Amino acid sequence: AKEQGRNNFQFFAPWMDSQVSNRLEMLISLRRALDQQEFKLFYQPKLSLKDGSIIGAEALIRWESPEQGMISPDRFIPFAEEAGLIVPIGEWVLRTACRQNKAWQDAGLPPVPVAVNLSPRQMNPALPDFVADVLAQSGLAAAWLELEITENVVMKDAEKTVAALHALKRLGLQISVDDFGTGYSSLSYLRRFPVDALKIDKSFVRDIARDADSAAIVKAVISLAHILNLRVIAEGVEDEEQHAFLKENGCDEVQGYYFGKPMTAADFTRRLGEEAGR
Ligand code: C2E
Ligand code: CA
Ligand code: CA
Ligand code: CA
């Protein structure tokens, strides 16, 4: 139901009934959220499967609404995309994540790349210059930024997307394909697109132990990634059984509640601090 909700406005119906009675009001409250700084970034650790060390962070947006409390991105990102507000929101996310990562580095914490999710709408010809500006303004070296794109980004306008991705890569950042295996695109884009990593979607990881097909898909994606010289990361790892399977089958990195839920910047700072003392 969650996945269906992405492109379906009925998804908002229960909420709209109570507080936000129509799309215009939703638009107004999202705009206000941006102006009043009601958005927060949480950070979830990515760990190496070799030694369990933290080797990255994914920035995940939340909306701290004065009326509604904490609102998860699945409940407002699809609307923001539809309404065109994803561009300014995405700019805020990128700026905030880069600044935060620079602050961690300046504090002497172990340096890790920060990953930012990109919506298809953000993938426009102006993006590489914008990213370059954000990096310059924040002082973060491009190597410490990773962009997570979905297969759908790739489908929109293949030629323009290829050009923008190459321009982004020239800046020196990392690009990974999120939710790998859930989109409709053919695999051929993997040859033309300058990507560095594949993220195995959490729906496959969840079913590793109870569904032989999911286990086989996970193994196949790990092999595919390695044949193509890509890193592979599994998301949504929730227990030891999944962890063991992924390690045994040569997955490079893991992310999931088993290792750490998305947390505030302050909590992630502490987590990185513990890492320094390992
Ligand atoms: P995603 O990029 O696939 O992010 C992974 C989602 O899985 C996150 O949900 C994360 O909190 C959740 N997750 C992490 N570990 C586990 C686990 O072990 N088990 C389970 N069941 N879930 C886990 P979240 O934070 O609610 O974000 C949902 C989606 O919203 C993201 O999916 C991403 O598509 C989108 N999103 C989040 N932040 C941003 C953003 O800044 N910009 C854009 N454009 N989209 C964003
Ligand atoms: Ca992601
Ligand atoms: Ca994902
Ligand atoms: Ca997802």
Image (spheres, rainbow, N blue to C red):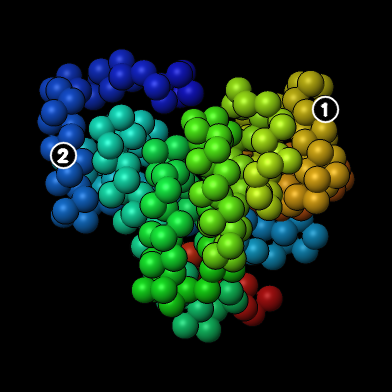
Instruction: Residue 226 in the image: state x and y as whole percent.
Output: 83, 47
Residue 70 visible, this angle: no
Residue 22 occupies quadrant: top left
Q: Is residue 88 left or right of residue 51?
A: left
Report the residue at 42% width, 44% height from top.
124
- Of 61 and 167, which appears nearest the observer? 167
How many numbered tags mark residues here? Answer: 2
User: At 36% across and 62% down in the image, what residue appears?
Assistant: 95
User: Which of 107/274 is in front?
Assistant: 107
- State the separation of the CA atoms marked 1 and 2: 44 Å
* Amino acid at the residue labelled 1: Ala
Of callouts 1 and 2, the N-terminal one: 2
Residue of label 1: 216
Reading the image, the residue beneath label 2 is 29
Image height of 51 relative to 236, above or below:
below
- The front one of 29 and 124 is 124
Picture layout, residue 112 above or below residue 90:
below
